[in-house]
Amino acid sequence: MHHRLLTVPLLLLLLAAPSFAEERLRLATTTSTENSGLLAELLPPFEQANDCKVDVIAVGTGKAIKLGETGDVDVVLVHARTLEDKFVADGYGVDRRDVMYNDFVILGPPADPAGIAGLKDAAVALGKIAAAKATFVSRGDQSGTHVKEKELWTAGGVEPVGDWYLEAGLGMGEVITMATERLGYALADRGTYLSYKDKTDLRVLVEGDERLFNPYGVIAVNPEKHPHVKFPLAEKFIDYLVSPEGQAAIAAYPRGGDPLFFIYEK
Amino acid sequence: MKPLLILNDIRFRRDDFVLTVEQLELQPGRIYLVHGPNGSGKSTLLHLLALLLIPEGGEVRFAGRRIDGGVDRQRLRRQITLVEQNPFLFDASVYHNLAFGLRLRDVRGDLQRRRVTQALHAVGLMGFESRWAKALSGGEARRVALARALVLRPKLLLLDEPTAGLDREILPIFERCLAALPGQGTTVVIASHDADQSRRLAGITLGIDRGRVISAAGDSFTQLKENA
Amino acid sequence: MGFLFESLQQSLQLIFSLDREVFLAVWTSLYTSLTAIVLAAACGVPFGATVGLLRFPGRGAVLTLFNTLMALPTVVVGLVLFGLFSRQGPLGSLGLLFTPWAMIAGQFVLAIPIVANYTLAAVAGADPRILPTAQTLGAGRLQGVWQLLLEVRFGVMAAIVAGFGRVIAEVGVAMMLGGNIRGYTRTMTTAIALETSKGEFAFGLALGIVLLGVALIVNLFLNLLQQR
């Protein structure tokens, strides 16, 4: 009877063993692409056509690139041009291509205590927030958004320190939620903001500065650095993203809503 | 007749307590009574006879064979069974308790069931197979423990105070059971403080005091000498 | 209040419509945790029993070590195994990072001290007569220990359930080693963390309810066994 007791978990174990039938491509990307739901729309046609599974590991851009450097993923889809260029220059990444873009916006509470609504200069706007010591929630996680935010503080000649400056260390969505709850300001990508529109009181206060342009790039991990990476499949994935089919899917997302990402005119 | 078990110059020590047996021979098919006050070493002697304790010095022979290695001890122990004064029943059915030793001896299936039924019958517990051991009364538990030993048909059966605190009605069942054993070729050693039992069971009395097996009476086959 | 109630309604809908995302996260959680606990039990129970029964030099140090490991923060386990499993690490060539196997390994490490410690306590608290009784009935040392484990089976099961409770509820290891990949390594806990961050409160709540349900079922099962 005691042997039978053991059979149950063993059977479960057998049933549970994950199948290794398909090839798996590992994609490290940012929370903005994953949380927006774009990848859930974009990936299935590619997976079907190539009989594979794309494992999406959604982290900040900094971490995504680190995973590429250590060879723990096969391809990265990120948005921080300076980090991307360094990644390629150091020989870890090859074949960087532009995939799409959206833009960053500065969000703030409707009351706008720092009075930045309608400003055209993002750096000036941040300067006013700092001067007013109004609450600002930063990603603080080396993500593409965080890198952009630091660039803007530098451009405005302000060093953000003080109890009004909150470094959350969280994803974009959490930061928007936190800023909503604390009636603070935040820098966000438009895509994530739009998908949160119904859940937040924050409004877009500053937009259109050309420094707020937010391009996404896709980069394969160099097989010369990491021989085990699935380079051919990664190349196929990159080709798919920039193909007319992939580009059309990006431009059309989400169906019947405000577009979250834009493609480059050819 | 060849003795079943021979102890020669045995010395065993635990903390301050020392047990010595100069010479002790147990003949097949006989009943021995170890008689002595509490703390005199009755239980220790039984454990030595059960090959559960390893003496510091001396010689133990079982069925003519000298025992030294652990494998020997383990194999021969299967022919010896000890029932403790306060026996432990496994948290399982009565049947499972009796079948435990049989399974270890590869007695299975119908034969196993028959032997269990027989043993329960012998102790007057017919139909107790599926009862849960932990739910038995004290007297029933003692009888199950005896049946659990009987079912193995050991060459040597060791009983530590088997009748202490037992109901008056159950005592005859016990003694009838034991009296039948020599006829089946089983040697029985009973540690008891009840001297009358020896007479009722027509057994041989061994005296023990302060760790010394000091006397033998009633049978010329045992040669016990007082320890100096 | 209205917000919570609405979310609760939505989450129940998600559960009872067998929403695919919910179902996959529940399935991933269950099979990784079950696999991890089966492996942890296979190693932790014998280990706990050994330490519980044997007396050896350095035993105290082993006990202290295991008590400390019981409180091991999950993120520390995640961190260390991340270093081991990363392509840059010593086990990188196995390609385990961001697979269910990496999570299973992490959960195994988390569960083993709990299983071993609780088993140890159960074995140390067992009736001291169990081993000698099994031996007098003819059991060898290993057979005796097996019987002892059967006697304290509820303690051992409680050990396994406690380990299961820890691994199915933990989020650090699953997040760091599994990578929260949708439909592959996304467990109930990492999904709750993610969905809450996305503001999908109802989805997180649905999984929270399922997680509670699993805990309830496991404990009911344990109770049922204990009453038998």
Image: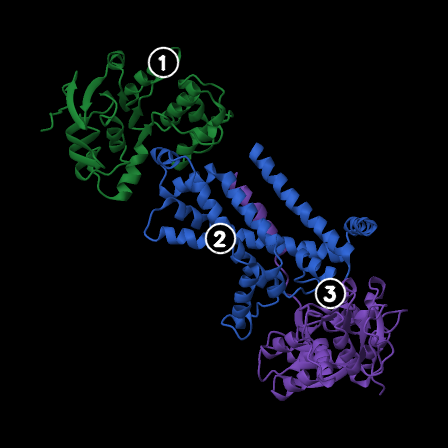
Chain colours: A purple, B green, C blue
Which residue is tagged 2?
Answer: C113
Labels 3, 2: one chain: no
Give the amino acid at mark 2.
Answer: Pro
Which of labels 1 and 2 is toward the front? Answer: 2
Give the amino acid at mark 3.
Answer: Glu
Q: Could you classify mark 1 by the number of other residues whose Cα lies within 10 Å: few (under 14), some (14-19), or many (20 or more)?
A: some
**Which of these two is toward me, A43 or A128?**
A128
Separation of residues labelled 1 and 2 (CA atoms): 51 Å
Separation of residues labelled 3 and 2 (CA atoms): 34 Å
Residue drawn at x 64%, y 78% as measured from the top left: A65
Residue drawn at x 85%, y 63% as measured from the top left: A198
Chain letter of the residue beneath label 2 in the structure image: C
Which residue is tagged 1?
Answer: B171
Q: Which element carries disc 2, helix, strand or loop?
A: helix
Chain letter of the residue beneath label 3 in the structure image: A
Q: Position of residue A145 (x, y in %)?
A: 73, 76
Labels 1, 2: one chain: no
Answer with left or right where residue A98 lies relative to residue A90: right
- Rendering quarter of residue C134: top left
- Rendering quarter of residue C227: top right
Q: Which element carries disc 1, helix, strand or loop?
A: helix
**Which of these two is toward me, B187 or C182?**
C182
Instruction: Tell me if residue A48 comes above or below residue B35 in the rendering.
Output: below
Answer with left or right where residue B9 lies relative to residue A244: left
Instruction: Tell me if residue A202 comes above or below residue A102 in the rendering.
Output: above
Task: Please say whether residue C165 is visible from this viewpoint.
Answer: yes
Q: Which mark is residue A174?
A: 3
Q: Could you classify mark 3 by the number of other residues whose Cα lies within 10 Å: few (under 14), some (14-19), or many (20 or more)?
A: some
